[in-house]
Image: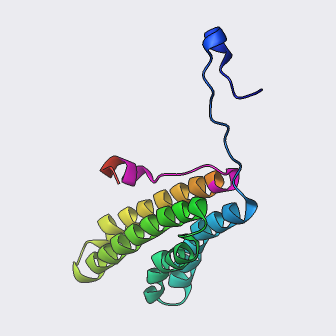
Amino acid sequence: MDGRDDSEGAGARILPVPVPVPATQRLLAMAAHLSMWLGAVLAASLDLRWLLSLWLLPGCLWLLARQRMRFAAAHCEQALALGGGVSMLCALLLVAILSISGATPIVLPALLCLLGTAVVWSLIAMVAAVRGRRYRNPVLRLMGG
């Protein structure tokens, strides 16, 4: 296995050999996705102001990794984007629940669906980080970002 594609015979092209991602970068990327949910647990158990940590903790990890660890920084950016979006939508939905009478039966299931979807996307991203693969958020892919 010398990196050649044997399907073309003598004029075979050389395929790039994937470089393995160091374990420290994979661990930092995984920590970024998990740190987002540490903030969610703190918000649920202590105070709703901890919703800010959905994006704050991955943002701090991104600041640490952005110059030297490209793989970890890319995962931190994705966790930051997901955490920021989820915290803003949660805040809007909670304001709707508290200010509009009768909105709870409609908004509360939407909030739970939002959180469930974010958990699934975060777990998928964490598995990709552990395997050393890049991950793009489905919503950011649709938006072209």
* Identity of the residue drawn at 50% across and 83% down: 43
As drawn, which residue projects farthest toward the right?
1
Q: In this view, does 94 lie above or below 80?
A: below
Front residue of this view, candidates 84 and 41: 84
Q: In this view, does 45 lie above or below 118?
A: below
* Identity of the residue drawn at 53% across and 72% down: 62
Q: In this view, does 96 lie above or below 131?
A: below
As drawn, which residue projects farthest toward the top?
9
Q: Is residue 91 left or right of residue 29?
A: left
Q: In this view, does 49 lie to the left or right of 125?
A: left
Examine the image and state in which quarter residue 23 appears.
Answer: bottom right
Task: Give the x, y percent position of residue 90.
Answer: 37, 73
Q: In this view, does 108 lie to the left or right of 34?
A: left
Q: What stretch is highlighted in magenta?
A: 129-141
Front residue of this view, candidates 135 and 11: 11
User: Total number of numbered labels?
Assistant: 0
Task: Give the x, y percent position of residue 22.
Answer: 72, 58
Tell me if residue 131 is in the magenta stretch: yes
Q: In which quarter of the image is the C terminus?
A: bottom left
As drawn, which residue projects farthest toward the left?
100
Q: In which quarter of the image is the N terminus?
A: top right
Tell me if residue 30 is in the magenta stretch: no
Examine the image and state in which quarter residue 10 appears.
Answer: top right
* Identity of the residue drawn at 65% across and 9% down: 9
Task: Give the x, y percent position of residue 25.
Answer: 67, 63
Q: How is the image coloured?
A: rainbow
* Identity of the residue drawn at 48% across and 52% down: 136
Front residue of this view, candidates 89 and 21: 21
